[in-house]
Image (tube, rainbow, N blue to C red):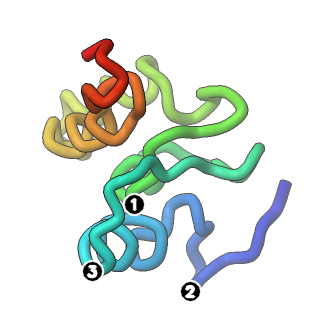
Amino acid sequence: MQLQLINGVHASANDLVVGTQVLKKQWGFTGLVMSDWGAVHETLGCVNGGLDLEMPSGEFINRATVLPLLKAGKISQATIDDKVRRHPAGDGRDGLA
């Protein structure tokens, strides 16, 4: 699936719109940011750009792709922690965490 680019970046990896600048910081959105089906095209940009969940599967955002980037310092532990907090199973609101 090819979706429109925003300033040359796929929306799923666009830090300005989707992630840490406008939606999460400026607007204070505390919910989960989930991709459209098949809209993820890479790992690093999406993880650092604010995407929390890749749908319908974890083709690009999974343990095998994220862990090496975390160990290399390209993704911070704080970024991963934020994604876990935003996920319904990790935020404590459902009584599971």
Which image quadrant: the N terminus? bottom right
Q: Which residue is mark 3?
A: 26
Q: Which residue is mark 2?
A: 7
- Label 2: few (<14), some (14–19) or many (≥20) C-alpha neighbours in 10 Å: few
Which numbered dot is residue 49?
Answer: 1
Upstream in sequence: badge 3 or badge 1: 3
Task: In this rendered view, identify the residue nearer to me: 29 or 8.
Answer: 29
For residue 72, side relative to residue 64 (left or right): left
Q: Could you tell me the amino acid type at mark 3?
A: Gln
Task: In this rendered view, identify the residue nearer to me: 74 or 47.
Answer: 47
Which numbered dot is residue 11?
Answer: none
Mark 2–mark 1 contact, CB under 8 Å?
Answer: no
Point 15% across, 36% down: residue: 77
Residue 69: x and y, percent? 30, 35
* Cα distance in 3D space between marks 2 and 1: 14 Å
Task: In this rendered view, identify the residue nearer to me: 26 or 55.
Answer: 26
- Label 1: few (<14), some (14–19) or many (≥20) C-alpha neighbours in 10 Å: many
